[in-house]
Structures are given as C-alpha cells and as structure tokens.
Amino acid sequence: MKHTAIQWADHTCNPWIGCTKVSTGCANCYAEVSVPARVKAIGWGKGKPRHRTSELTWGQPKAWNHFAAKEGVRRRVFPSLCDPFDDEVPIDWLWDFLDLIGHTPNLDWLLLTKRPENIEPRIYAHCNWQRKDRFWDFRRHMPNVWLGVSVENQEMADARIPVLLSIPAKIHFVSVEPMLGPVDLEPFLTEWDNSDEGKSGYAPPLDWVIFGGESIGGRECDIGWIRDGIRQCAFREVPVFVKQLGSCPSLDGARVTFKHRKGGDIDEWPEDLRVREFPAV
C-alpha cells in the first residue's frame, strides 16, 4: 500500500503546509508550488501564516497504523510540505503532531528538517522543561521517529549534521537534495568526537543517506558527486538511497539527457548508481 510518489516513503502526511526559505537549497522549493499550496493560496516566507491541515488528513495515519499492524509490516511516513521544526509554527501544533506520532507506533515517521537547531528548544519550550533538568531522547520517547536533515552543499552539511547527531534518535539520516555540489560525508559516517558542539563524548554515525538532484529550477547535479557519495557510504557500510539524478544532470561538465524529466527512472541510470537501500530497523 503506497500513497506517495516519493520513492523512499510509503505515505505522506502534512500536519501543516507552509515554510520560510533558509538557505540556497530552498530557492526552487517544490512544496511552495505544489498543488495544495497553490489551491489554498498558502504564502511562503517569514511572517506568512502556516496552514494547519484538516482533521481528515490528521486521521489518515491512524488508519495506516491499523493496517500496518494487521499486515505485520512497518510503513514509512514523510511530512513533505513543511518543516516539522519550523519555529514559525504554533508550538501546540507541533505537540499535537508529536502526539499523533506517539499514537501510531507501527509507522516510522521520517522527520526531515533544515532547522536542527530548533529541535530541542521547541520541545523544551512546550514542556516547560529546563535543559539541565530533563533530557529529550527520541529513542526512548519516540522510537518510531527517524530524524534527518536536508543539506545541499558542504557548508550546510558541516552546519547541520553535527547538530542532528547530537540529538538521540533511533535513525539519523541525511537527504543530500538538491545536491548542488560535492559533499564530503566521511567525518559523519563513523563515530566522532562532538565536544566542539558543546556535548561530551562521541556522537553516533549517520544511519542512512539519500542523494538526489534538483527536481525543478535547472540547477546542475553532476553524476560524479552522487557517485562519490555512494563510494563514501559503501566504504563505511552506510545504506544509500539514490532518489533521482535531477532535471539538469551532468557528468564532468557535460549535460546528460534522460527521458524522465526529473532523472528519476532508475532503468536509465548507469548500473553503479542504481542503489536504493534502507537502514535496518
């Protein structure tokens, strides 16, 4: 049972729609021009109100959870038109969303953010917890959450991934999409010293990496960048999922043409790029 075209998820469920662009990877945001955003005339940007979705939408995961339990399988759910840790979203909306996640234990929720620095402050603010008194651990409080960050280049990888890995979660993942340049993930594919991030001890490595070129907008994705990312992950035995090569793929500066407009037909790709793995859960 699959209810989304996103290759690495089974379902999409958006508790709200809307966002503010925070880095160059956001420039050609697919969510901003999605059908729900256009039909509901949802504005993007700072100060623009987010749109909370209907009770029908919020109720769908409970049905998916029921069928997953009945079938003895786990289903992956992705909020595709929002950032779960957007600080312009009413805090009660986030808590309602986390409550829904807690009541759907047979679903794995893939929470992808460009704002990992907001995760702990948003949670503690709502709970009225002091950081020194209580510690939020997704592994213990919500083991069905996969926590991820979206990065588009080395600058964002170096800024976001250390923050992500400092927050305990069952699965840590990175979506390198849109991939706008080569990205060295090697420092984050093994256990590493995170004392520079204000933590103590060692942070765990990444559990999963997604690669993909940009869907719309025409910004180049060199196939060699993805190929090198696959090599890095294979060396450290970290699962990789190549989603698409993008609408403007190239190789060593020369344009590569595929029939699929987003470079998403795996049968058109070179054999070594046909990698679609998932972390063990």
Image (tube, helix red, strand yellow):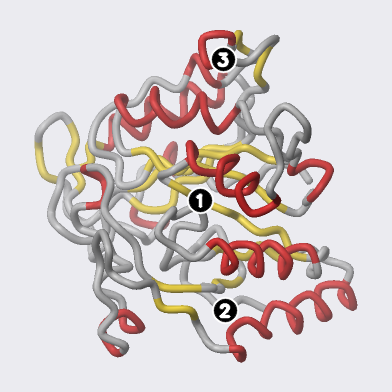
Mark carried by residue 112? 1
The image quarter in which residue 266 lies? bottom left
Q: Secondary structure at mark 3?
A: loop
Q: Secondary structure at mark 2?
A: loop
Whether 276 is drawn above or below 75: the answer is above
Whether 11 is drawn above or below 121: the answer is below
Dot 2 or dot 1, earlier in sequence: 2
Q: Secondary structure at mark 1?
A: strand
Dot 3 or dot 1, earlier in sequence: 1
- Please state which of residues 68 and 62 is positioned toward the viewer in this rendering: 62
In the rendered image, residue 234, in percent from the top left (x then y), is placed at 56, 25
**Residue at 35% from the left image edge and 49% from the top image edge:** 269
Left or right for 114, reference 152: right
In the rendered image, residue 83, in percent from the top left (x then y), is placed at 45, 57
Q: Nearer the viewer, mark 3 or mark 1?
A: 3
The local crowd at label 2, few if under 14, some if 14 to 19, many if 20 or more residues have their Cα within 10 Å, is few
**Residue at 59% from the left image edge and 28% from the top image edge:** 165
The image quarter in which residue 130 lies? top right
In the rendered image, residue 223, in percent from the top left (x then y), is placed at 28, 37
Three-letter amino acid code of the residue under disc 2: His
- Please state which of residues 157 and 194 is positioned toward the viewer in this rendering: 194
Residue highlighted by disc 3: 198
In the picture, the quarter occupied by the N terminus is bottom right
**Residue at 44% from the left image edge and 37% from the top image edge:** 272
Residue highlighted by disc 2: 3
Q: Nearer the viewer, mark 2 or mark 1?
A: 1
Whether 165 is drawn above or below 120: the answer is above
Cα distance between the residues tagged 2 and 3: 41 Å
Cα distance between the residues tagged 2 and 1: 18 Å
The local crowd at label 3, few if under 14, some if 14 to 19, many if 20 or more residues have their Cα within 10 Å, is few
Three-letter amino acid code of the residue under disc 3: Gly
The local crowd at label 1, few if under 14, some if 14 to 19, many if 20 or more residues have their Cα within 10 Å, is many
